[in-house]
Image (cartoon, rainbow, N blue to C red):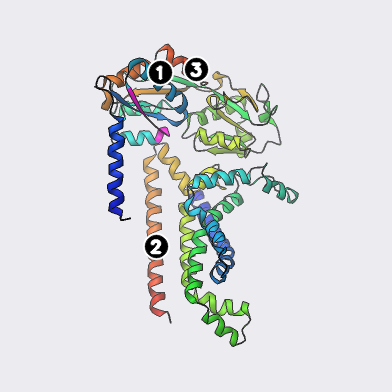
Amino acid sequence: MKPLGVLARLSGLIAVVCALNVAPAAAATVQIAVASNFMEPAKEIAAAFSAKTGHQTNLSFGPTGQIYVQISHGAPFEVFLSADKERPQQAEKDGFSVDDTRFTYAVGRLVLYSTRPGFVDAHGKVLAREDLEHLAIADPTIAPYGLAAVESLGKLGLYDRLKPKIVQGSSIAQTFQFVQTGAAEVGFVALSQVINRPDGSRWIVPAKFHSPIDQQAVLLKTGANNPAAKAFMAFLKSPTARAIIRRYGYETP
Amino acid sequence: MADVIWTTLKLASLTTVLLLVLATPLAWWLARQKVWWKEIIAAVAALPIVLPPTVLGFYLLLLLAPSSPLMELLQPFGIQSLAFTFPGLLIGSMVYSLPFAVQPIRNGFEAMGDRPMEVAATLRATPLNAFFTVAVPQARRGFLTAAVLVFAHTVGEFGVVLMIGGGVPGQTEVISVKLYQLVESLQFGEAHRLAAGLLIFSFVVLLTMFLTERRARKTAP
């Protein structure tokens, strides 16, 4: 097949897909960029939102940092659900967002988790074990959960001792993978990742051990005049949305 | 930063040397064998080109974790786990770059044809002797291409390192993941320097390869 032929077919396909996506006249569509770790609850919230308001949603998922780079380079997202508070603050500072729309929609909880039953005790004393080989955390320079893990280790007075044993995942998803595959015996992951897993053993780190893992949302300038975007921001604060968020292992402010 | 660059260069050099040694017999076998099912082996050896590095990395992570069958085999030798270690990363890089070593060397051997080896045999050279004095020099361009590709490919490797590395300084923290980390944490200044360095390096490597190939082609018999 000639390359041009492929291109022609592709563009035909794209045209069809776009046509299918056209929303009913009364309702609008909102483009939402969501941090990967919030994928499941976001889908559920979006479904509830559409059922209630009739507006449509287009969800894009990715690492928060990448989403932000895309936004700053003109990506057509209208609402940004970040996994941290830094990027929405940055969006505000750089003038990509509508003023006074930023708020915390979910607060993450840190968990020390192992796939081995009975390995992690109720106070995290497992961290003091001499024979511990690897402790997985998310990269603290990138991921809020990684920073929270380092702060918690500091609070426990174990950071210096455990430093040589720390392995870093580039995201909290990857950190979870390190633990799930058994490559690291234990790791600091997100409660939302293990809330539906009754197996293994865990210690939910007290929230006062680290600074809060705030996940913030912000309305972007591209969506300033889109009723669906504004409606979604409002819906995110509703009791329905908050109940979904809590069910996935987050707290709500 | 020097630490990261040193680890990267060490990884790329070791991968290149070990992989050339390992890929040569395989490439030779693939080039000389006439049986049809050798293409099954060839396809398996070429898989890393097609597989997303994350898939490869995920399997490698499972393979290098303490509970894997491979690690159980190695346990008597005092090896518990290779995930998050330099040797583990070396194994990963070798798997990842295997096709880039096998393919050019195989092509080199195939281009030579059967004739030179037959002539060497009539001159009473042992097969091993003929291999080193006739086949290897004949396929030198294949070896050069393989070495350059493997080295450059390892320097640029990202997905696999991300999956099995764990970013341990001095062990598994290499340029590509460091770059990712810098960009993600919005340290664009340092990221720019590292990225520009990598760009120039890659260009110089490829240019050197093309120029050497050109010269080799001119002086080829």
Tell whether label 3 touches label 1 (CB within 8 Å): no
Q: Secondary structure at mark 1?
A: helix
**Which residue does the numbered mark 1 point to in the structure image?**
A48
**Residue A11, percent from left and from top:** 28, 43
Say which element carries label 2: helix
Looking at the image, is A146 positioned above or below residue B193? above
Q: Amino acid at mark 1?
A: Ala
Q: Is residue A207 visible?
A: yes
Which numbered marker is on residue B206?
2
Residue for point 46% across, 34% down? A142
* Whether residue A216 is situated above or below residue B10 in the rendered picture: above
In the image shown, does B71 or A171 lie closer to the viewer?
B71
Residue for badge 3: A246
Q: Nearer the viewer, mark 1 or mark 3?
A: 1
- Comparing labels 2 and 1, the label whose residue is closer to the camera: 1
Which residue is farthest top?
A239
- As for residue B219 lying within the magenta part, the answer is no
N-term mark: 1 or 3:
1
Magenta-tinted stretch: A56-65
Chain for numbered disc 3: A
Q: B4 or A110, which lies in front? A: A110
